[in-house]
Every structure is written in C-alpha cells, then in structure tokens.
Image: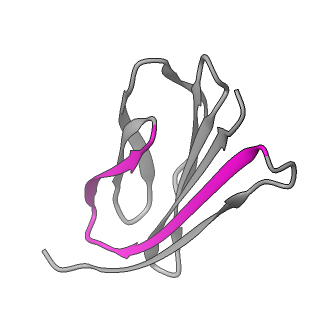
Amino acid sequence: MSSNAKIEIDADLGTSGTIFELDVDTDWLLPPGTYVEPTIAGDVTVAYDESQRTFRSADLLDGWAISSQSGSGTDITMTITDQSTSDTVRITAKIDDGKVDVENRTRVALAR
C-alpha cells in the first residue's frame, strides 16, 4: 500500500512552564480501513470510510483510562487521562480536504 502523509510536530512548555505539550498533526491520504494511532497512553484504533470515523478500541497502559469520547461521523474526539497524574492525551480524527487528519495532543506535568 502506498500512502502520502504530512506530519507536523510541535513541542514546548505550556505558559506556566510546568506542563510539557506535544502536538502531532498527521494528514493521511489513505484508503478506507482501520489504523492504529500510537500515544504515550497506549494504542488507539480508528476505523474510517468515506463518510464516517469510529474509535474501534483503545489498548491502554496501566493507569490510563478514557475520560471522554465525543462526536460522530466525520469528526470524533477521545480524551485519555492518567488516573494518578492527570496527564492527558486527546485524539481527534476528521476528514479535511479529502485526507484523514489525526491530531494527537499530549499534556504531561513536569513537576510532581
């Protein structure tokens, strides 16, 4: 299978200087199917066809749990939270200009 992708990565400290922020945006030109989005919390499986995105599963590491899930059809979002630290990962999958756009937003506290 051949695919085209554009990946943007932005990493910095939040305005308070105590939160590490890592944002990874990926635009994929892929055929319909099921794909795995890796995160620091574990793997999230996203399925899509021409008209709908669906979270199929989340194989999370110990201590992480899905804290919210919203959207349907072409725009879906899942937030995963580490239950002991409140670190978060937010995955958004949508269609943008005919490509699958996956946004992976990770927020991790530096001081514990």
Q: In x, y percent, where is residue 90?
A: 59, 45
Looking at the image, residue 20 lies above or below residue 94: above
Extreme front residue here? 111
Q: Quadrant of residue 58?
A: top left
Q: Position of residue 53 (x, y in %)?
A: 44, 52
Q: How many numbered marks, from 0 up?
A: 0
Quadrant of the frame with the N terminus: bottom left
Q: Does residue 59 sit above or below 8 in this rendering?
A: above
Q: Which secondary structure is most common in the magenta stretch?
A: strand
Inspect this view and state whether residue 75 appears. Answer: yes
* Percent coordinates x, y for residue 9 in the rendering: 54, 70
- Residue at 53%, 63% (x, y): give it: 24
Q: Magenta segment: does it hold 33?
A: yes
Q: Is 27 above or below relative to 76?
A: below
Q: Residue at x 28, y 63 (%)?
A: 32
Instruction: Report the front residue among 9 and 90.
Output: 9
Vertical position of residue 54 compared to residue 81: above or below: below
Residue 23 magenta-highlighted: yes
* 50 left or right of 14 in image: left
Furthest residue in direction right, as rendered: 16
Q: Which residues are magenta?
A: 18-40
**Is 69 in front, or is 38?**
38
For the C terminus, give its image quadrant: top right
For image coordinates 66% across by 53% down, the residue present is: 21
- Residue drawn at (52%, 81%), measured in percent from left and top? 97
Q: Which residue is nearer to you in this view: 7 or 28?
A: 7
Q: Residue furthest left?
A: 1
The colour style of the image is one colour
Residue 70: tell me if it is visible.
no
Q: In x, y percent, where is residue 65? A: 51, 22
Relative horizontal placement of residue 34, taking residue 17 as reference (left or right): left
